[in-house]
Image (tube, coloured by chain):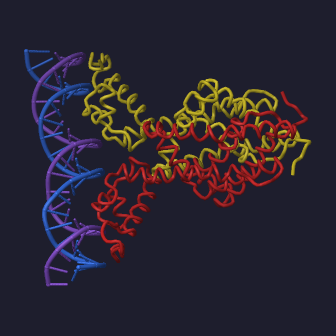
Chain colours: A red, B yellow, C purple, D blue
Amino acid sequence: MITSGRKVNTGRHRMLSEDTEQAILLAAEQEFMQKGYEGTKTVTIARNAGVTHAMLHYYFGTKERLFNKIFNEKMSLLGKMVTDVIFEPDMTPLEKITAVVDRHFDFLAEHPDLPRFLLNELAYNSERRRMVEHKLRFAWGKLLPPLQLDWDKMIVEEGMKPISMIDFILDVVSLNLFVFLALPVLDVVIDEFYGSRKAFFEARKRENVEIIMQRLLQNNNAYE
Amino acid sequence: MITSGRKVNTGRHRMLSEDTEQAILLAAEQEFMQKGYEGTKTVTIARNAGVTHAMLHYYFGTKERLFNKIFNEKMSLLGKMVTDVIFEPDMTPLEKITAVVDRHFDFLAEHPDLPRFLLNELAYNSERRRMVEHKLRFAWGKLLPPLQLDWDKMIVEEGMKPISMIDFILDVVSLNLFVFLALPVLDVVIDEFYGSRKAFFEARKRENVEIIMQRLLQNNNAYE
DNA sequence: CTTTGTTCTAACAGCTTTGTTAAACAATCT
DNA sequence: AGATTGTTTAACAAAGCTGTTAGAACAAAG
């Protein structure tokens, strides 16, 4: 089915068959996401793509290069998430926070395997970690300072409980990401206590928004 | 250094050299934790244990069996955590909650790689997942019902915001576990914003206790 | 229907990894 | 001493995996 047709090629020479390439990329993505770099065998990718395993090397050279293509694509997705989530329309500060948590969660629900995949490959490979470190520093060097100003202003003007922005971000990320990082294990819990993933996601999203809001609002019954 | 001496053996026969076995187990634990099942090679374990690689098979048969020994040991540790954390001394309900979150965090800090290791091997291996599923169901079948009673009582008597116990548990686990699941990536953030892991851990523990308590306490400034 | 460059297959080369085995060795028991 | 048992080594076998290559099949254009 892949070999259905050679690429129609007006410009003469030097063009690969998109279909085959795509089939390999798709199969590779599934395998790498499911089993990680080391757990994935190139022969399996080829088999799942319906292609001889020599083709995989013809198109992508090495397993490493194929993996990097997938990995970088997923890293871009992560970057896209940040920009998608961070810049919100005109709302009151509280509405903004709600919207951020909400959209962050929704994004993750659309890419449930993304966090575990990235976190893992970074945990298991120190070289990749070093590569990403630069990107991270650069990214937040540009993103954080402007946000910080808005943040401090909001805390004062809205009379919120003081909290550093970075701590707050970690709160949101912890609560939202965990749902997806632990999904393979949580599936058992979900089955028993929530019925379906959908119901579970909705419940957790509500709860995460709730707990985050409660953290920010001033509370008269001080404990301690 | 391992081959220094054969085991002195009063009890006659049928005893393996504890030293060698331990050296292999220790090296295996380090490798498996750091690189996962697939990323770990038995020759590397043997080399790090200072032992020929045939010894590894002499003592443990197969890579799988060796891995399972480590894996089960870590699962027991997880079980131990639950019992350690859940049964608290006499305190007011609010103090109890604080203590639970606190001890849960401290336990994780003593075993920072445990959650990622277990979560990963479960995510990557469906057979292991099925094995664990039974244990989980059995465990909470015994643990949850009695806790549930205390929980509902506490909510009413202390005038807390209503929240299901399971949602509350997920809140605590999300916040505490994430710190350690994401540690390899967070290290970059830590370096920049907290100085040291120790400082980061302390800050996060405080914050996690804080956000959890705020979630439970009734709040006069209702938002929405 | 030949030429030209591209896509694809089958076979294979070479390395890595897991696992086995035979024989040497050390300690203990008789 | 010699037999017995448990431990270790070195060498080997077999399978698995990544990557290569020679050339066949093919499509398009001359």
**Is A68 drawn above or below residue A2 in the view shown?**
above
Residue C16 coordinates in the image, percent (x, y): 26, 42
Q: Quarter of the image for the C terminus of chain A: give it.
A: top right
User: In this view of the protein, which residue sits in the foreground, B93 or C16?
Assistant: C16
Q: Quarter of the image for the N terminus of chain A: give it.
A: bottom left
Determine the residue positioned at 56% across, 40% down.
A136
Q: In which quarter of the image is residue B183?
A: top right
Q: Is residue A54 left or right of residue B114?
A: left
Determine the residue positioned at 41% across, 48% down.
A37
Determine the residue positioned at 59% across, 26% down.
B197
Q: Quadrant of residue B221?
A: top right
User: In this view of the protein, which residue sits in the foreground, A104 or B88?
Assistant: A104
**Is B7 drawn above or below residue A38 in the view shown?**
above
Residue A217 coordinates in the image, percent (x, y): 84, 40
User: In this view of the protein, which residue sits in the foreground, B5 or A79?
Assistant: A79
Q: How many labels does the image show?
A: 0
Determine the residue positioned at 76% across, 31% down.
B96
**Is A224 drawn above or below residue A188 in the view shown?**
above
Residue A205 coordinates in the image, percent (x, y): 71, 53
Residue B41 coordinates in the image, percent (x, y): 33, 39
**Is A35 drawn above or below residue A15 in the view shown?**
above
